[in-house]
Amino acid sequence: MIKRKDSKDGAGSTRSQILDAAEAILSADGYAAVTSRAIAEKANLKSRLVHYYFGTMDDLFLAVIRRIEDRYFAATLQKMTSGFAAQDLLEGIMSNVDTRVMQELSALALRRDDVRDEVARVLDRARQMDIAMMEKMSKDLRLEKSGLSPTVLALLMAGAIRVLTEETAIGVTRGHDELLAYFQTLAQRAPRS
């Protein structure tokens, strides 16, 4: 891929404005609404700039995926290396604002091979990180008594978060409070550091 001017993703850069607009559209309207014209309108730019910075729409989607990946891993590594409390970490996982955008990118991944490969890579890497976090917290969460392995808990939480996000977006919330209360109870069982 050709290096573009202003390739740093710093706040206020044209590239950052384009990515912000793409994420906002993905979250609000879904992947089908992400066009160079819609992005340009949202970012108050000329539509040709979208292709100048990203070449193709797939290049743009890949950049969004990598940007979300960078945010997730930076936040997770910071929590894991700063003496995090299990409660703080579980609450952070449950309130991940990038879940809706990743759901849209996962839907797009069913139709575009390059996007599929990147989403699969990022989700697998995130799963490894989630399992590592659960392993680190397993004693605090008393997982050995629950019969849940760190891997099973990581998968259950990831699935629950996706379901909550998807269902909330379409207006279904039955059972959500009970599930969130369960995760809150689980988090509260762990001592604060």
Image (tube, rainbow, N blue to C red):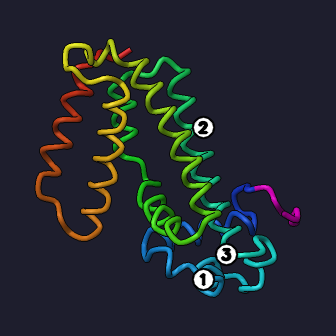
> Residue drawn 44% across and 29% down?
131
Give the residue at mark 3. Answer: 57
Residue located beneath label 1 in the image: 35
Which residue appears at 54% of the width and 66% of the height?
23
Of mark 2 and mark 1, the one earlier in the sequence is: 1
**Residue to which mark 2 is pinned:** 74
* Number of residues whose C-alpha sits closer than 10 Å to that of mark 1, classed few (under 14), some (14–19) or many (20 or more): some
Identify the residue at image location x=57%, y=52%: 68
**Quadrant of residue 151 within the rendered picture:** top left
- Numbered range of the magenta stretch: 1-8
Label count reads 3
Which quarter of the figure is the N terminus placed in? bottom right
Q: Which mark is residue 141?
A: none
Instruction: Out of 112 and 74, give the one closest to the viewer.
Output: 112
Residue 31 position within the rendered picture, expressed as x and y whole percent measured from the top left: 50, 74
- Between the C-alphas of marks 1 and 3, the distance is 8 Å
Q: Amino acid at mark 3?
A: Met
Position of residue 85 in the picture relative to residue 179 (left or right)? right
For label 2, the crowd category at 10 Å Cα-Cα, with few meaning under 14, some 14 to 19 and many 20 or more, is few
Eye-nearest disc, 2 or 1: 1
Q: Secondary structure at mark 2?
A: helix
Residue 192 versus residue 140: which sits nearer the camera? Answer: 140
